[in-house]
Image (tube, helix red, strand yellow):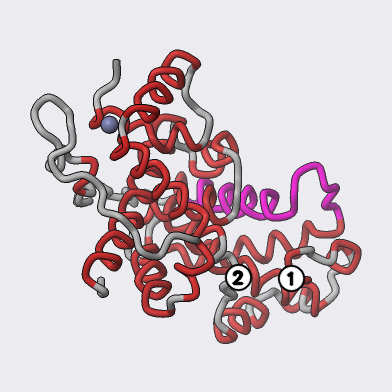
């Protein structure tokens, strides 16, 4: 039987489905009975969904210009 | 968003605008990957070299992997080659990292039960969390301040959705290391959200 501290360490592997069936089973048994760990995993999942929504940050125009200006002349678009 | 679909046909023709959009979309990630392998001082240089390689190789891109995985592999190879050439040791030091409180035992009793369980969140959906400008900035700043390798793992996995196996290859670190670093980064961000929800600031 896993304790709460152990569950916190396995939480990401649980979200990424990297646990073996035995670990996965123990973890599911635990969170079925423990509201704190259930909340921990729920919040970790929400956190991951948040950052997934942040993938639209573009490079600064200066950085882009720097890259394009430094292409070798023969390759310049 | 349209820019999520790179214009492959034009890229393969080395079209200027298509290439510029590719640089806009991936330059930040490329710098992060380079820094994780070669360190801060050479990351910009390696990034530039990688873009030149990408540009030259575009006509022969065959689409066997996604274009972003292909680009990450190119920068990774540039950085690894450079690392071997450098006589001085540019290995990244990740030892100074502070382990998040959820993971260093301080929130647990000796028997492994919670002494300080996770607080309730008032804002309970990803959309609402991101709509909160201050909280969004807190999250962005926390990502920015992650140690180099951890930041790279996190960005490749949770923002760019690369597989764990691809990340091991790109960064040349073991599967178990990738998982540990990823977990620390996620938990650190979760703690920032905890803190914001409890105190209204971070
Ligand atoms: Zn528990």
Disc 2 is attached to a residue of which chain?
Answer: A
Q: Position of residue B197 (x, y in %)?
A: 29, 66
Distance between mark 1 and mark 2 Cα atoms = 9 Å
Q: Looking at the image, do the residues carrying marks 1 and 2 touch, with CB atoms under 8 Å apart? A: yes
Q: Quadrant of residue A66?
A: bottom right
* Residue identified by numbered label 1: B1
Can residue B76 be found in the magenta stretch? yes
- Name the residue at 8% across, 28% down: B110
Dot 1 alpha-carbon crowd within 10 angstroms: few under 14, some 14 to 19, many 20 or more? few
Nearer-the-camera pick, B174 or B14:
B174
Q: Nearer the viewer, residue A18 or B43?
A: A18
The residue closer to the viewer here, B176 or A75, is: B176
Residue at disc 2, CB closer than 8 Å to ligand 1: no
Ligand 1 is found in which quarter of the picture?
top left
- Which residue is located at x 49 percent, y 75 percent? B131
Q: Residue B107 placed where, x, y %?
A: 15, 42
Indicate the secondary structure of the residue bearing disc 1: loop
| Secondary-structure class at tag 2 | loop
Q: Residue visible at 34% across and 43% down?
A: A40
């Amino acid at each position: 039987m896993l304790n709460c501290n152990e569950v916190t360490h396995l939480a990401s592997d649980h979200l990424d489905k990297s646990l073996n069936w035995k670990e996965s089973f123990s973890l599911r048994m635990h969170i079925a009975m423990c509201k704190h760990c259930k909340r921990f995993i729920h919040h970790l999942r929400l956190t991951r969904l948040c950052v997934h929504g942040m993938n639209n940050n573009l490079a600064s125009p200066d950085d882009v210009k720097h890259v394009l200006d430094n292409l070798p002349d023969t390759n310049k678009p | 968003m349209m820019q999520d679909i790179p214009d492959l046909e034009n890229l393969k023709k080395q079209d200027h605008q298509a290439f510029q959009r590719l640089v806009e979309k991936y330059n930040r990630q490329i710098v992060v990957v380079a820094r994780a392998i070669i360190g801060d001082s050479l990351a910009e240089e390696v990034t530039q070299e990688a873009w030149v390689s990408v540009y030259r190789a575009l006509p022969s891109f065959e689409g066997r992997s996604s274009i972003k995985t292909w680009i990450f592999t190119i920068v990774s190879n540039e950085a690894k080659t450079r690392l071997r050439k450098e006589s001085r040791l540019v290995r990244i030091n990740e030892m100074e990292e502070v382990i998040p409180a959820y993971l260093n035992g301080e929130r647990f009793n000796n028997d492994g039960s919670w002494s300080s369980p996770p607080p309730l969140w008032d804002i309970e959906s990803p959309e609402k969390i991101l709509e909160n400008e201050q909280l969004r900035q807190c999250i962005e700043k926390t990502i920015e301040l992650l140690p180099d390798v951890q930041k790279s793992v996190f960005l490749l996995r949770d923002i760019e959705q690369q597989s764990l196996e691809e990340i091991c290859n790109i960064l040349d670190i073991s599967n178990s290391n990738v998982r540990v670093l990823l977990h620390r980064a996620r938990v650190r961000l979760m703690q920032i959200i905890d803190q914001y929800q409890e105190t209204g600031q971070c």
